């Protein structure tokens, strides 16, 4: 995968899950 593909995936996740859930996801042990 090219680096920009990762950015596209991240943007899609932001749109799907919403920016409000991102802080909780970032704090999860999975990251």
Image: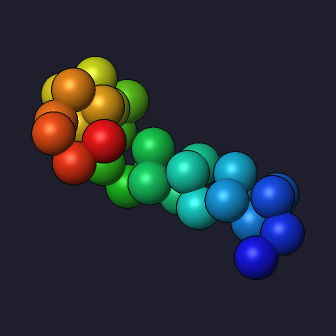
Q: Residue at x 55, y 51 (%)?
A: 10
Q: Quarter of the image containing the N terminus?
A: bottom right
In the image: residue 29, left or right of residue 11: left
31 up-or-down from 2: above or below: above
Position of residue 17 measured from the top left corner of the image (x, y, whole percent): 30, 48
Please indicate, yes or no, whether residue 13 appears anywhere in the rendered image. yes
Left or right: where does residue 13 sit relative to residue 5? left
Q: How many marks?
A: 0
Against 7, residue 2 (above or below) is below
- The x, y position of residue 30, in whole percent, is 22, 48
Q: Which residue is drawn at 75% across and 66% down?
A: 5
Q: Nearer the viewer, residue 24 or 20?
A: 24
Res. 21 in view:
no
Residue drawn at 16 percent across, 36 percent down: 28
Quarter placement of the C terminus? top left
Way the structure is coloured? rainbow
In percent of the image, x 15 and y 39: which residue is there? 29
Residue 9: image quadrant is bottom right
Q: In this view of the protein, which residue sits in the foreground, 3 or 20? A: 3
View extreme (bottom): residue: 1
């Amino acid at each position: 995968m090219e680096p920009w593909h990762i950015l596209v995936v991240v943007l899609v996740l932001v749109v799907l899950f919403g920016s409000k859930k991102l802080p909780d996801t970032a704090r999860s042990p999975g990251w």
